[in-house]
Amino acid sequence: MWNSKHESMGREELTHLQQERLIALVEKLYSRVPFYKKRMDEKGVTPKDIKTITDIAKLPFTTKQDMREVYPYGLLATDINEIVEIHTSSGTTGKPVVGAYTRNDIELWSEVMARTLAMGETTKEDTVHNGYGYGLFTGGLGVHYGARKIGANLIPISGGNTKRQLMVMQDFKSTVLTCTPSYSLLMAEVAKEEGIDFDKLSLRVGLFGAEPWGEGMRREIEDKLKLKALDIYGLTEIIGPGVASECMQQNGLHIFEDVFYPEIIDPETGEVLPHGEKGELVITTLTREGTPVLRYRTRDITYLMPEQCACGRTIIRMHRLLGRTDDMLIIRGVNVFPSQIEEVLMKIEGTEPHYQIVVQRHGQLDSIEVQVEMTEKLFSDEIKDLSSTEKNIEAEIYSTLNVHSKVKLVEPKSIPRSEGKAKRVIDKRNIQGGRS
């Protein structure tokens, strides 16, 4: 463990720490951030009403739309002169979300990212190949700060130029890979074209995040890159990467709950749900200085796992993401998450882990077409074999999700690749007049 004091703290001591930090946070937000004072006043709650950690349920939620509406500095809880770094979300659907960092925030980020990298047993003896994008995106610099805190040899290569990435991995004997899971598979594809054998590289572990991915894709990555693939989790709204991570047990993501307080709520009612029940993850930043966030609704669907992990850490774990409320497709009354379709596809022999889901509307009915790449071997087979595979996948999707779909096998390498987050869903309903 990087920080055994906080990663294996007793539950009573941890709850007391969370309580102290929550009380201090609420007092700070009420006195310094007009947005939160207004929201708390509207709910009829004051700092004096927050006496225990369970009182957090009395406090208002924060949404991504809230953060966009107060762009750029509406959530700032400190003097602007104390801010040393700014990061934002992509802002592709309006104003971006802003994260402002004080020096202490950067140190906090470095700390939780050191813990994250240590989940993959990273030490100062390792060479970290950081393929996350640098700039306003939080991924690259988050890993950068964590690796520097550990003292590892850091290669800040960022994304893109995949052939060069592979050359650098070979020449500098990288042992730890960090990038999006979809980009790691693109690396594997290019490596095969270049005649590079991952068995002969020094990579032993990869920390992959910034997009949802399932167990099927994990198996694919581990098989092709010859490493152990760990899931990491973070959000620009909270701090960036470093909120939670799998350890080498690969059994849920440990949330660093001394600084990020997690809740699971019913996404419809906002009611707090008990451990083990699926719902929407909500996170409060207990110690952030620049732009602390109260009860942020992540839109990510998961559940909390309170049982102690075999690794010895006592902090709570969350199950790998089951989907997102804003990515969920409702097809003829059935809730469908892209991650569920991915899990089906990963079980089908003859397909590659590259796919897109096209949603269309015909009259008043929605339909989905799943376009999935076939392997070179299947591509060379007779047309009747392709048709049989398509029907097999359609049957598997219906059996698993109870939704009818059209499956279209497409040529190898015909679905666009991404060096960042993969685009899995193409929703043509908006083009045809929007959703009802």
Image (spheres, rainbow, N blue to C red):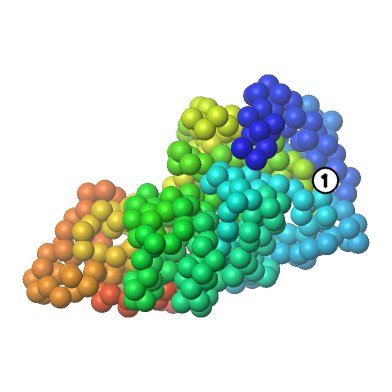
Q: Position of residue 162 (x, y in %)?
A: 47, 75
Left or right placement of residue 115 versus residue 217 in this view: right
* Whether residue 396 can be seen here: yes
Name the residue at 51% across, 69% down: 171
Q: Callout 1 environment at 10 Å: few (<14), some (14 to 19), or many (20+)?
A: many
Task: Give the vertical position of 297 relative to 358 (above or below).
Answer: above
Name the residue at 26% across, 48% down: 400
Q: Quadrant of the C terminus?
A: bottom left
Q: Position of residue 165 (x, y in %)?
A: 51, 72
Looking at the rendered structure, the secondary structure element under dot 1 is: helix
Left or right placement of residue 310 versus residue 14 in this view: left
Name the residue at 29% across, 56% down: 346
Q: Position of residue 37 (x, y in %)?
A: 83, 46
* Whether residue 239 can be seen here: no
Task: Give the vertical position of 284 relative to 177 (above or below).
Answer: above
Foreground of the two, 181 or 214: 181
Left or right placement of residue 391 versus residue 121 in this view: left
* Marker count (numbered): 1
Outermost residue, top side: 12
Task: Give the vertical position of 144 relative to 304 (above or below).
Answer: below
Which residue is the site of mark 1?
29
Foreground of the two, 318 or 33: 318
Name the residue at 28% across, 58% down: 345
Task: Give the vertical position of 25 relative to 35 (above or below).
Answer: above
